[in-house]
Image (cartoon, rainbow, N blue to C red):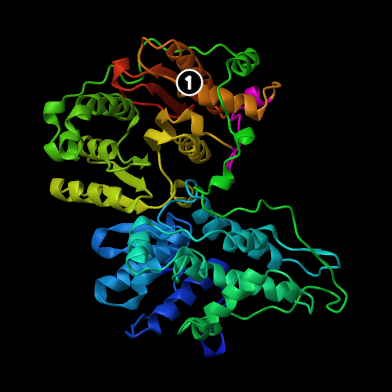
Amino acid sequence: MDSLFLEVYSDPVLGGKVTVPLQSLICLFILDYIQSAQVRLRRPFKLTKLEDAPVCVRNCLLPVAEVSAASTCVAGLCAVLRQVVKSTLKEHPDHPCRALLGFREGCLMACAEASTWTRFCEVDIIETTQQMLQVNGMQSPVTLPKDLVRFEYHMSQPLRIHNVQKVRQEHAKVSDTDLDHCFAEGPTLTLADMIILPCVRLLLASLHSVYLKEHLSLTRRWLDLMKQQQGVEDALEHVLVLPQSKVLDEMFVQYLLPEVPNQSLYKSDPRRYKSKARTFTRQDELDESLLKVPVIPEYEASPFGCDVSFDWEAVPLEANPQGGQLPEVRLERKGQQLENLAKAALKLARQGDVIVDFCSGAGHLGIILAHFLPRCTVILLENKEESLKRARQRVDKLNLSNVSFYQCNLDYFQGPFDIGVSLHACGVATDLVIQRCIKQGASFVSCPCCYGSVQDNHQLSYPRSSLFRSTNLSLREYLVIGHSADQTHDKFNHKTSQGKRCMAIIDTDRCTQAKEAGYQVHMSRLVPETCTPKNNLLVGVPQDRHFLM
């Protein structure tokens, strides 16, 4: 039976009531809504201490769903709520909660780092609501929260209709004008609405005055529609206690709108792309940026771990790329990439180590390490459901007992580990991996990718090292170098050598960051270099870490 672990702030008082953080409240609200539908569900609750919870739960930020049949922990609000719906459907395939997953069951499937919409639902609106609840009082004029206004503008945008829905609409002879952006993702209620609803109710209660009705008309229309949905209001009343207005003089208050772009919260909205804000590779700008780089990148002659013996004949089929559903044309090069990183990790590994394969995909690298290191624990950490499902199938066929599965973004994983590995973690993900390893004091083995997609976000900023930040190299100039680093074409293209130089600069910044944290670092290229255009290998070892080979 699957289990859901939520954080609570207090022991139950009279009537079984507890005080909970906002994310737990949202989970309880949706659980209550699902239980109030056509099928009654029995969901027993138990109060437990964190130290008594399963290891995988302790390793993650709550909320966490433990999927017992798949030996998987799911973390992150959106992923957990998707799992709650899927667990319900396993027991009751015809349960109406399936509609919450949206078109092709893809609602909030993308991670917060990749999806503006998921980030809004999982991070932005949650943080805004939490900040508002901490406010003691507000004097006029009151500026409305940015994320509340962002949602209002989102609801004013044209309805997003998928191709299949367009076809059905045409067959029904319904024009576009007959459809309205009534719910957060379109014409039907989804998990996104259910996450946003408690937040908006709390925000509006905190901002309440007689003048507030003049503002946020589309958000209010959406609220009225949500109240009409069967079971929604009852479920919300069971878990939510609204605060008093924080406006000190409700009869004399002026509301101000913050400066917020009038665009949808979908990353694909054309309005989000303004040519002036995009990073193009203008040669003159790149040349100026390169002049400000504080060091000359240097590669080691051979990759770290090149002296470790590695025999593909000793690797079972299911641990081999051939057993991982890769196209034939990629098999040889994928094997060469994996061998380089596996040898580096094998050189670092000691008996009893915990090794995390970050952004593991189908688990190609982690499964090889689990096979060769039976006395180590290997964690496959991946936010895509289908990729982790394929990895689990391969592990089951190999009967590996030293592999654990975590479906979450890497920032939700908080457990201890000794070595972190990542093969072609895209852009920002590579820096999140290195940052997590440095914070843990763990070794790292990384082959970066997608240099052009690095950008400041809610977790880190660029440049990464103090040395690079101490120069007058601006963020835009740094991003121009990163953008140029993706121009590694074939050896006959005149941009390739320049692209490789830019790759080396970005990775030197990463290595310098680790050096400043007391790491011994190694930067080299994979062998053979032709196995991938993105062929830099970064290895960081804490000073107190001694490897045996």
Up the image or down, 45 lies above or below 400; here it is below
Depth check, front residue: 48 or 447: 447
Up the image or down, 187 lies above or below 516; here it is below
What amino acid is labelled 1 in the image? Met
Q: Quadrant of residue 108?
A: bottom left
Q: Quadrant of residue 151?
A: bottom right
Mark 1, secondary structure of its residue: helix
**Total of numbered circles in the picture?**
1
Using residue 396 as the reference point, say whether residue 471 is left or right of it.
Answer: right
Taking the image as drawn, is residue 311 in sight? Answer: yes
Q: Main secondary structure of the magenta part?
A: loop
Region in magenta: 456-469
Residue projecting furthest to the bottom: 15
Using residue 106 as the reference point, say whether residue 196 is left or right of it.
Answer: right
**Residue 87 horizontal/vertical position (percent):** 31, 69
Near mark 1 (Cα within 10 A), the count class, few <14, some 14-19 or many ≥20, is: many
Quarter containing the N terminus: bottom left
Q: At 36% across and 80% down in the image, what residue appears?
A: 43
Using residue 285 as the reference point, say whether residue 441 is left or right of it.
Answer: left
Up the image or down, 285 lies above or below 213; here it is above
**Residue 183 horizontal/vertical position (percent):** 51, 69
Q: Quadrant of residue 547?
A: top left
Depth check, front residue: 161 or 306: 161
Q: At 27% across and 43% down in the image, what residue appears?
A: 362
Q: At 43% across and 24% down in the image, what residue appears?
A: 538
Q: Is residue 468 magenta?
A: yes
Taking the image as drawn, is residue 3 in sight? Answer: no
Which residue in the structure is indicated by mark 1? 503
Quarter containing the C terminus: top left
**Residue 361 horizontal/vertical position (percent):** 31, 42
Q: Is residue 215 magenta?
A: no
**Residue 431 horizontal/vertical position (percent):** 50, 35
